[in-house]
Image (tube, rainbow, N blue to C red):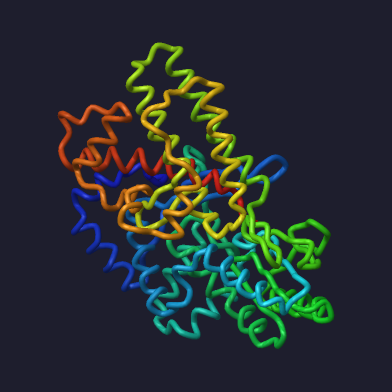
């Protein structure tokens, strides 16, 4: 994906050695400067401001990746955190039946509110090279702007651009003082994923835990949404259930938030409607059927791509409400009957995908596509199914075309999961 300079990955790859040498020299000297990031907006739903994602240039991505590798080495506990792990830990605490109250705290405008001076002070405790600190500050101070807009001149003094390889790492460093404060409080079970905080405790300790967490946030110039019933921040009884990271949780059951189910069903409906449109507009029937089967199966099973498990069932694999999976499989059957989609090859199912994820075996390993393991043969097979002519493509062109299609499909899968806050 290109940045505002319009330079492609292929153009940089042709001269990669020299490009990396220049980037390395300037980073070591602390003189590297970043091009304003390209703005992409993602809708979060009706009545909500869109999420701004910052896309760096290819050259800047190389520099940022180097900074990310350094941060991972210095702060190993700040990388690789998955929301599913946080959900599993929270459920383990709930199932001890030691807590009757939950406190959910959601930070207001987290990424845009990160104070650069506070962040740099925290980083300075472990990073002593002024050149490295200077590059990190420049990276987060670089503004984001849409294509064809004037080049921004003012640098940012607060906020961390979302979408950079260092964004989540810096967020973890920034929230570390809050974690230390809350971990030191007895009789509570504290959980956090980025800016979503969950505290399990007794009703007698709830208000105090809520106040201490808000004070810890205030100490790093952050504020949280006020606690209201059903709001982003809330204090309530565990027996009544609550939402956390897209899940609906109680002491003995874990399900999925209704909006995430609706979003998935809407995506499945659009896949069926697209097949019907293609057929009625005269597309080759075999091609229309192949495209339909590929996209429908991917929406059901998700996939592994670039080391990440993507998709609705992949994200919500912690659920234990199996009736929901039966409902989803029934929804797909009803869509197929409504649109008259082909019955062969037999479609994949949410139920089997769930068990393939929860209990992987050699015979079910192929049920969830792992695109990272695909060779040229598998890529050509899928490209052919999607209507791409690979007969005159080089091996690199086949790989580029395949990855381009998969990245687009993965973005659709991310939309299925939706905004977790």
Percent x, y of residue 195: 63, 65
In the rendered image of this protein, does residue 307 appear above or below residue 100? Answer: above
Rendered view: 12 above or below 335: below
For the point 36% across and 42% down, the residue is 406
Which part of the image, by quadrant, shows the N terminus?
top left
* 385 relative position to 154: left or right: left
- Which of these two is toward me, 196 or 164? 196
Relative to residue 225, is residue 95 drawn left or right? left
Q: Position of residue 106 (x, y in %)?
A: 70, 63
The spot of residue 270 in percent (x, y) is 53, 29
Label count reads 0
Q: Quadrant of residue 235?
A: bottom right
Q: Quadrant of the C terminus?
A: bottom right
Q: Residue at x 66, y 84 (%)?
A: 181
Q: Is residue 262 above or below residue 185?
A: above
Quadrant of the image occupied by residue 286: top left
Q: Residue at x 52, y 50 (%)?
A: 53
State whether residue 290 is above or below residue 24. above
Residue plotted at (63% across, 45% down): 44
Q: Nearer the viewer, residue 74 or 231?
A: 231
């Amino acid at each position: 994906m290109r940045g505002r300079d319009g330079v492609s990955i292929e153009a940089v790859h042709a001269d990669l050695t020299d490009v990396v040498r220049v980037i390395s020299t300037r980073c070591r000297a602390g003189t590297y400067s970043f091009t304003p990031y390209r703005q992409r907006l993602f809708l979060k739903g009706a009545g909500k401001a869109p999420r701004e994602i910052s896309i760096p240039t290819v050259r800047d991505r190389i520099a940022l990746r180097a900074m990310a590798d350094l941060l991972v080495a210095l702060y190993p506990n700040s990388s690789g955190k998955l929301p599913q792990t946080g959900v599993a830990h929270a459920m383990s605490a709930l199932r001890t039946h030691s807590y009757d109250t939950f406190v959910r705290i959601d930070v207001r405008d987290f990424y845009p509110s990160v104070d650069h001076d506070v962040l740099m002070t925290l980083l300075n405790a472990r990073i002593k090279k002024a050149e490295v600190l200077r590059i990190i500050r420049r990276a987060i101070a670089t503004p984001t702007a849409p294509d064809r807009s004037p080049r921004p001149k003012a640098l940012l003094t607060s906020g961390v651009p979302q979408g950079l390889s260092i964004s989540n790492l810096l967020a973890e460093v920034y929230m570390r003082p809050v974690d230390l404060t809350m971990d030191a409080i007895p009789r509570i079970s504290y959980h956090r994923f980025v800016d979503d905080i969950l505290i399990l405790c007794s009703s007698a300790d709830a208000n105090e835990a809520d106040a201490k967490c808000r004070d810890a946030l205030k100490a790093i110039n952050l504020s949280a949404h006020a606690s209201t019933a059903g709001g982003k921040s809330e204090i309530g009884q565990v027996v009544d259930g609550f939402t956390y990271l897209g899940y609906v949780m109680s002491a003995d059951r874990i399900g999925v938030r209704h909006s995430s189910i609706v979003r998935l069903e809407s995506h499945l409906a659009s896949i069926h409607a697209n097949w019907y449109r293609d057929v009625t507009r005269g597309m080759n029937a075999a091609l229309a059927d192949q495209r339909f089967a590929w996209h429908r199966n991917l929406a059901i099973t998700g996939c592994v791509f670039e080391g990440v498990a993507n998709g609705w069932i992949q994200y919500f694999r912690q659920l234990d409400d199996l009736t929901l999976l039966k409902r989803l499989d029934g929804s797909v059957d009803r869509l197929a009957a409504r649109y008259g989609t082909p019955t062969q090859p037999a479609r994949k199912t949410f139920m089997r995908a769930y068990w393939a994820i929860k209990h992987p075996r050699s015979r079910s390993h192929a049920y969830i596509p792992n695109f990272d393991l695909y060779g040229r043969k598998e890529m050509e097979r899928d490209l052919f199914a999607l209507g791409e002519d690979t007969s005159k493509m080089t091996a690199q062109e086949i790989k580029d075309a395949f990855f381009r299609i998969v990245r687009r499909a993965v973005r659709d899968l991310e939309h299925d999961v939706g905004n977790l806050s």
